[in-house]
Image (spheres, rainbow, N blue to C red):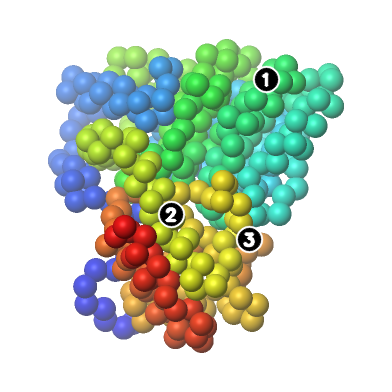
């Protein structure tokens, strides 16, 4: 392997860069997770998580990835054979659908082009058709990390309310929480799923679910088997500051510090920072002549930029060149976008100069790969950032 001096640039859309403050917190000596001090830590974390999810209801924390959150949301609220309406907005939406099928749920998957969010017109039409209320849950990936498309959660809630439909609303915010405005309670979401390794600036290993009263009521009637993912056991133990089994202790130390950093910056400022970096990255892409996977400006997510490469180019070969020559990792194209797209992550612990370095690496890589017209993107981004 080629030796590289300096720091590797991690520009995938998760896991993201972990701040030094969080790394220091993670390195604390492990303490007794049954101690009074740990109970205080748990209580503080749970209250501060509510501020990020914008809810007054409970938030549960599992030692898991985001995929575990998908499973927990399903098994706690649904029963075998229940119909779930899902939308194929990209790779991760499709994986969630496969998880639901594995659990014996009847998945009605609305096809999509992998270039946009949830189609609200199709949703409204399908809800109106469901006269017998067979659909028990509607799911959505708020930010589809494979494409950079953002779905309108308020729009989904309006569609449900307009149809007078009682289906549960389950939303994946794994790559959108703490990067763009999200309001679990106000938007009437029943289960919001998130994970630690993106906007929350931690390593992978923690999964979160914010719960509504409707979701908690559904969990008492749900008949899918659950043990590890059981909300009731988690909530009962959390009430006294503990967990029903060994938690990811040191990750919780890091979470406390990450939540403190979000409070210090202010969530609205965090959202503005992400939106600003997204706009700079897209101005660079426009100068390079590259097309966003998600063409609609109103649906473009603030935490990443997913770009299609020209016909005849291999996006993975471009990523290989950039990694070997400039020591920077970019996100690969997933599923249908394999070899056709790459993704620049600009979420979490990030600033203007980090973005400038990332865009410089992409521009140099495009030139080495033979896309000679890809010039001026870095300058376009810098002009915007400096204005």
Name the quadrant containing residue 262: top left
Q: Position of residue 150 (x, y in %)?
A: 56, 45
Q: Check if mark 3's residue and mark 1's residue have beta carbons within 8 Å.
A: no
Q: Is the C-beta separation of discs 3 and 2 under 8 Å?
A: no
Residue 220 in sight in this render: yes
Crowding at mark 3 (Cα within 10 Å: few <14, some 14-19, many 20+): some
How far, Cα to Cα, is label 3 from label 1?
33 Å
Numbered circle sitting on residue 26:
none
Closest to the observer, 21 or 302: 302
Q: Is the N terminus in the top left, top right, bottom left or bottom right quadrant?
A: bottom left
CA distance separating discs 1 and 2: 32 Å
Q: Which mark is residue 161?
A: 1
Mark with earlier residue (3, 1): 1
Number of the label disc, if any, that sits on residue 278: 2
Of 386 and 27, which appears nearest the observer? 386
| Circle 3 residue | 335
Whether residue 116 is situated above or below residue 246 in the rendered picture: below
Compare marks 3 and 2 and give the one earlier in the sequence. 2
């Amino acid at each position: 392997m080629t030796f590289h001096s300096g720091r590797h640039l991690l520009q995938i859309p998760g896991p993201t860069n972990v701040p030094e403050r969080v790394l220091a917190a993670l390195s604390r000596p492990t303490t007794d997770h049954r101690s009074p001090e740990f109970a205080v830590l748990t209580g503080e974390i749970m209250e501060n998580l509510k501020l990020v999810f914008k809810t007054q209801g409970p938030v549960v924390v599992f030692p898991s990835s985001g995929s575990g959150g998908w499973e927990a949301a399903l098994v706690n609220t649904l029963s075998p054979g229940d119909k779930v309406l899902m939308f194929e907005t990209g790779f991760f939406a499709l994986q969630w659908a496969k998880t639901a099928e594995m659990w014996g749920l009847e998945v009605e998957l609305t096809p999509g082009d992998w270039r946009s969010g949830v189609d609200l017109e199709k949703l409204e039409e399908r809800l109106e058709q469901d006269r017998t209320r067979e659909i028990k849950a509607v799911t959505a990936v708020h930010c589809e990390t494979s494409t950079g498309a953002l779905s309108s959660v308020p729009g989904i809630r309006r569609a449900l309310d307009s149809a007078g439909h009682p289906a549960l609303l389950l939303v994946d915010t794994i790559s959108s929480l703490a990067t763009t405005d999200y309001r679990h309670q106000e938007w009437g979401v029943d289960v919001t799923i998130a994970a630690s390794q993106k906007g929350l600036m931690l390593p992978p290993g923690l999964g979160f679910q914010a719960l509504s009263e409707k979701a908690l009521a559904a969990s008492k009637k749900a008949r899918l088997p659950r043990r590890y993912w059981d909300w009731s056991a988690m909530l009962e133990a959390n009430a006294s500051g503990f967990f029903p089994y060994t938690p990811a202790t040191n990750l919780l130390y890091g979470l406390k510090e990450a939540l403190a950093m979000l409070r210090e910056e202010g969530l609205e400022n965090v959202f503005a920072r992400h939106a600003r970096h997204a706009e700079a990255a897209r101005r660079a892409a426009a100068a390079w002549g590259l097309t966003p996977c998600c063409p609609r400006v109103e649906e473009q997510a603030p935490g990443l930029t997913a770009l299609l490469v020209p016909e005849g180019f291999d996006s993975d070969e471009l990523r290989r060149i950039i990694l070997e020559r400039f020591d920077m990792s970019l996100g690969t194209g997933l599923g249908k976008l394999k070899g056709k797209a790459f993704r620049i992550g600009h979420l979490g612990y990030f600033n203007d100069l980090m973005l400038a370095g990332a865009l410089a690496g992409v521009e140099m890589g495009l030139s080495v790969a033979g896309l000679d017209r890809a010039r001026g993107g870095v300058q376009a981004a810098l002009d915007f950032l400096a204005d």
